[in-house]
């Protein structure tokens, strides 16, 4: 098994098991289909905006939005056909994403890391998709000797530039696994709001040990406060989400280890 240096660099090559590699392929396929879904939606939106037919509702890609799409009419039969093709492209992309997510849930029941997945989703913002992505990409997180090593491995620590006697920190290094870094940053958006135990969060937590529940609640209190404090200083959104994602990584490590 791979070990890591203090800088977060691998000192030997970690090789995933066949089981882990299969789950990783499944999560990456779902990620690719999700990207295709986003592109299909963007193409449909661009077509409608080009013809001054924007959607004025609040929630896109819900039942109300699709009902509205059914009412959109063009004078040209050709343009009406184009609209329908764009809509069908979106629906097909959504079906593929849903199908892969169903396969992920089915594969999880037989996965040796199922208990760890269930523990990680006690954290606010960490969905089943996020937990499976993290563990399929990283494997046994206990191979990292500290949360700092894991943060460095994921490229979530600031880069350093030295010149003579001066030392300056820059943006994050963005080294390591970009798949995990992306899902963690997405998870952080859930910490924009005040800490509270919603029904869904509580149900997830109750399937775990008291220790995990305590860590998850402490994480929520700290990260919600951290998000608000950083946002209040006027930092750009990317800096805020990256900083909170770095701290979320530490709580992931604590639960997994």
Image (spheres, helix red, strand yellow):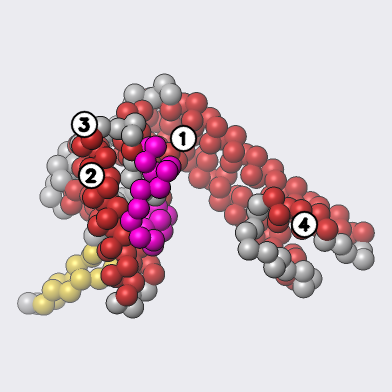
Q: Is residue 9 visible?
A: no
Residue at 36% x, 28% y: name it: 114
Residue at 38% x, 37% y: name it: 204
- Residue under label 1, please give it: 25
Q: CA distance from mark 4 to mark 1?
A: 34 Å
Q: CA distance from mark 4 to mark 3?
A: 53 Å
- Residue under label 4, please give it: 69
- Tell me the quarter of the image containing the N terminus: top left
Q: CA distance from mark 4 to mark 2?
A: 45 Å
Give the foreground label among 4 and 1.
Answer: 4
Residue 255 x, y percent position in the rendering: 24, 39
Q: Nearer the viewer, residue 145 or 10?
A: 145
Disc nearer the start of the sequence (3/1): 3
Give the foreground label among 2 and 1.
Answer: 2
Residue at disc 2, secondary structure: helix
Q: Is residue 15 visible?
A: yes
Residue at 36% x, 48% y: name it: 197
Asked if disc 3 and disc 1 are in contact, CB closer than 8 Å, the reply is no
- Residue under label 3, please give it: 1
In the picture, measured across the screen, residue 194 lies left or right of residue 213, that is: right
Residue at disc 3, secondary structure: loop
Mark 4 burial class by Cα count in 10 Å: few <14, some 14-19, many 20+: some
Q: Nearer the viewer, residue 246 or 225?
A: 225
* Main secondary-structure element of the magenta-colored stretch: helix
Q: Which residues are magenta?
A: 185-204
- Residue under label 2, please give it: 215
Residue 25 is covered by the magenta coloring: no
Give the foreground label among 2 and 3.
Answer: 2
Disc nearer the start of the sequence (2/3): 3
Residue 202 is covered by the magenta coloring: yes
Asked if disc 4 and disc 2 are in contact, CB closer than 8 Å, the reply is no
Disc nearer the start of the sequence (2/1): 1
């Amino acid at each position: 098994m791979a070990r890591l240096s203090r800088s977060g660099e691998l000192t030997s090559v970690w090789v995933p098991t066949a089981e882990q590699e299969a789950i990783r392929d499944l999560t990456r396929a779902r990620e690719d289909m999700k990207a295709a879904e986003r592109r299909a939606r963007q193409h449909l939106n661009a077509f409608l905006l080009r013809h001054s037919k924007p959607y004025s509702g609040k929630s896109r890609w819900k039942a109300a939005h699709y009902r509205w799409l059914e009412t959109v009419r063009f004078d040209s039969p050709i343009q009406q056909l184009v609209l329908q093709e764009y809509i069908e492209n979106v629906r097909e992309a959504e079906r593929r994403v849903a199908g892969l997510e169903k396969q992920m849930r089915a594969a999880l029941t037989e996965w040796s890391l199922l208990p760890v997945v269930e523990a990680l989703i006690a954290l606010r913002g960490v969905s089943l998709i996020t937990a499976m992505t993290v563990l399929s990409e990283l494997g046994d997180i206990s191979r990292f000797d500290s949360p700092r090593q894991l943060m460095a491995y994921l490229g979530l620590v600031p880069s350093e530039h030295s010149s003579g006697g001066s030392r300056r920190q820059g943006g994050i290094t963005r080294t390591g696994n970009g798949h995990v870094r992306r899902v963690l940053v997405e998870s952080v958006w859930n910490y924009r709001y005040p800490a509270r135990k919603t029904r869904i969060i509580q149900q997830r937590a109750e399937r775990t040990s008291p220790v995990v529940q305590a860590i998850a609640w402490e994480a929520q209190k700290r990260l919600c406060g951290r998000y608000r404090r950083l946002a209040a200083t006027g930092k750009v959104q990317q800096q805020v989400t990256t900083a909170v994602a770095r701290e979320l990584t530490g709580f992931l490590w604590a639960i997994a280890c």
